[in-house]
């Protein structure tokens, strides 16, 4: 699964790396938690260009009666995303990229959980495969997102049996193309990421508290 992640680079770096034209302001983050706002990349329907927007992390289906359901839908299993009522429409029409510089997972040990940070060996940002929805509650409209998960790769499987779906840059446009409804080709992208280009290392329990949101979170033990 993916319950915390980081985006420790400024907006202009996102613009440059992901080839986005319009800038939105956000603060670099090192401990993003569910129900918080996260930047995500979608395709503009008219220009077909990549657009960066802010989303509530925790998908709220358009048919939901209460936005609280989003706190339970921070992740979507890739194996069932085409059939689950909460995700199947978003999978067809509303896919997004969720940029990150690394994510966290916790290994269950005898009396505690050991946190780990997972990032790319070259320290470059990368993107999770995500879905998004627009939900109307009264007079407000909330745009929300979820992160897809898959089986853990060899680098992570000793820590957890699941990991977020990480997309290759060459697959970004195919993933966010709202006109692409070929479920079979899209599902082919939802595989464990290559473990030989990722780095996994233990960190302190400092990251356990969401209010701790600074570079200390990613410092190796």
Image (cartoon, rainbow, N blue to C red):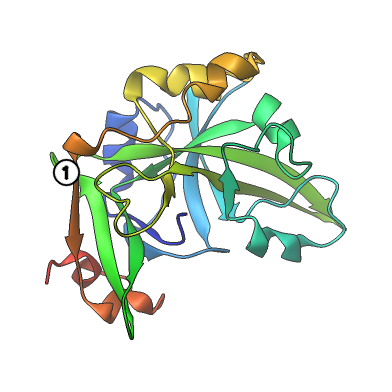
**Mark count:** 1
- The residue sitting at the front extreme is 110
Mark 1 surroundings: few (<14), some (14-19) or many (≥20) residues within 10 A:
few
Rendered location of residue 42, percent (x, y): 54, 31
Residue located 77% across and 48% down the image = 135
- The residue sitting at the bottom extreme is 111
Q: Secondary structure at mark 1?
A: loop
Horizontal arrangement in the rendering, residue 35 relative to residue 87 (left or right): left
User: In this rendering, is residue 63 above or below 193?
Assistant: below
Horizontal arrangement in the rendering, residue 3 relative to residue 63 (left or right): left
Residue located 11% across and 72% down the image = 221
Front position in the image: 49 or 71: 71
Rendered location of residue 168, percent (x, y): 34, 26
- Judging by the rendered image, the residue that carries numbered circle 1 is 123
Q: Quadrant of residue 167?
A: top left
Whether residue 176 is visible, yes or no, is yes
Residue located 62% across and 14% down the image = 180
Whether residue 47 is visible, yes or no, is no
Residue located 61% across and 56% down the image = 58
User: In this rendering, is residue 207 above or below 131?
Assistant: below
Front position in the image: 136 or 102: 102
Rendered location of residue 212, percent (x, y): 33, 77
Front position in the image: 145 or 80: 80
Horizontal arrangement in the rendering, residue 27 relative to residue 76 (left or right): left
Rendered location of residue 20, percent (x, y): 39, 28
């Amino acid at each position: 699964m993916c319950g915390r992640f980081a985006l420790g680079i400024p907006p202009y770096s996102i613009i440059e790396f992901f080839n986005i034209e319009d800038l939105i302001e956000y603060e670099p983050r090192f401990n993003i938690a569910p129900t918080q706002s996260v930047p995500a990349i979608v395709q503009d329907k008219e220009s077909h260009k990549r657009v960066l927007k802010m989303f509530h992390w925790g998908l709220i289906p358009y048919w939901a009666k209460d936005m609280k359901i989003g706190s339970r839908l921070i992740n979507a299993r890739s194996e069932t995303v085409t059939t689950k009522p909460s995700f199947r429409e978003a999978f067809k029409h509303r896919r997004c990229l969720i940029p990150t510089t690394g994510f966290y997972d916790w290994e269950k040990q005898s009396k505690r959980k050991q946190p780990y940070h997972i990032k790319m060996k070259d320290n470059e940002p990368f993107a999770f495969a995500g879905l998004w929805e627009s939900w109307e509650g009264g007079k407000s409209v909330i745009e929300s997102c979820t992160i897809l998960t898959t089986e853990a790769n060899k680098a992570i499987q000793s820590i957890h049996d699941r990991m977020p779906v990480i997309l290759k840059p060459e697959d970004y446009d195919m993933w966010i193309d709202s006109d692409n409804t070929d479920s079979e080709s899209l599902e082919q992208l939802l595989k464990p990421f290559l473990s030989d280009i990722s780095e996994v290392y233990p960190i302190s329990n400092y990251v356990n508290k969401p209010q701790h949101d600074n570079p200390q979170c990613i410092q190796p033990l």
